[in-house]
Amino acid sequence: MRDVEREVVRALKAGEGDYREQDIERIQFQDCDLSGQSFFQASLENVVFTRCNLSLVDFRHARLQAVRFVECKLVGIPFLNADPFALEIHFQSCKLISCNFGGMRLRKAAFRDCDLQDCAFIGSDMAEADFSRSMFRGSEFNGTDLRKADFRGAAGYRINPLNNKVRKARFDLPEVLSLLEFLDIEITP
């Protein structure tokens, strides 16, 4: 993702601003409480959210192009309702709780150093995604394309290699051993 100059918006409180159907380009939201905010049918391009609360934000039909979330809290967001055209989102050091990425095409998306609790990646194309150094708790991968995805340094994931594509995905020991639990085999020391 290229580095561009952005206008900075700081310390917005919940309910401030109306972003529905707006074109939002080259903006950096810092330390904002955007919980419950609607970005319905908005177009976001080259936007960065830093240390923001994005709980229950509405991204329905929003166009998310080159959007980064850094050190943010994201709760209950059904990203699958965003506009799939030109979708490009990245997360760095974020806490994601009950977010749904089901059926999305997120090739090369980044979820680095994130805490992912009860998130759904069912039927998603996550090929070459970067989940490095992330912690998973209760997140679900089912029918997910994880080919060449990077899970190095990640922990807590439960990935069934029989119903997810994992060819050439990268994992670390000892966490990679969790993939064996689905194979109904016995391992002796």
Image (cartoon, rainbow, N blue to C red):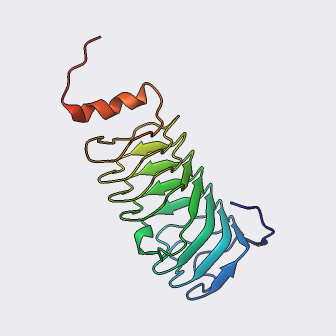
Total numbered labels: 0
Question: Where residue 82 sits: x, y (%)?
Answer: 47, 75
Q: Quadrant of the C terminus?
A: top left
Indicate whether 17 appears above or below 188: below
Residue 34 spot, x, y in % from top left: 58, 72
In this rendered view, identify the residue nearer to me: 169 or 96.
169
Q: Is residue 33 visible?
A: no
Q: Nearer the viewer, residue 166 or 74?
A: 166
Q: Residue furthest front?
A: 167
**Residue with the most extreme bottom position:** 21
Q: Which quarter of the image is occupied by the N terminus?
A: bottom right
Quadrant of the rendered image containing residue 98: bottom left
Q: Can residue 51 be seen at all in this image of the molecule?
A: yes
Q: Residue at x 51, y 75 (%)?
A: 85
Q: What's the residue at 29%, 30% (across, down)?
A: 180
Relative to 52, is 136 on the left or the right?
A: left
The relative height of residue 59 versus residue 166 in the rendered view (above or below) is below
Instruction: Pick out the residue farthest to the left.
Output: 184
- At 76% from the left edge and 61% from the top edge, which residue is drawn? 3
**Looking at this view, is 60 or 177 the one in front?**
177
Of the pair 62 and 75, the residue shown nearer to us: 62
Residue beneath the point at 30% across and 54% down? 143
Percent x, y of residue 183: 22, 32
Residue 184 to residue 117: above or below: above
Q: Quadrant of residue 73?
A: bottom right
**Residue at the farthest top position:** 189
Q: Can you give x and y, in whole percent of width and height, for residue 123 in the image?
A: 33, 59
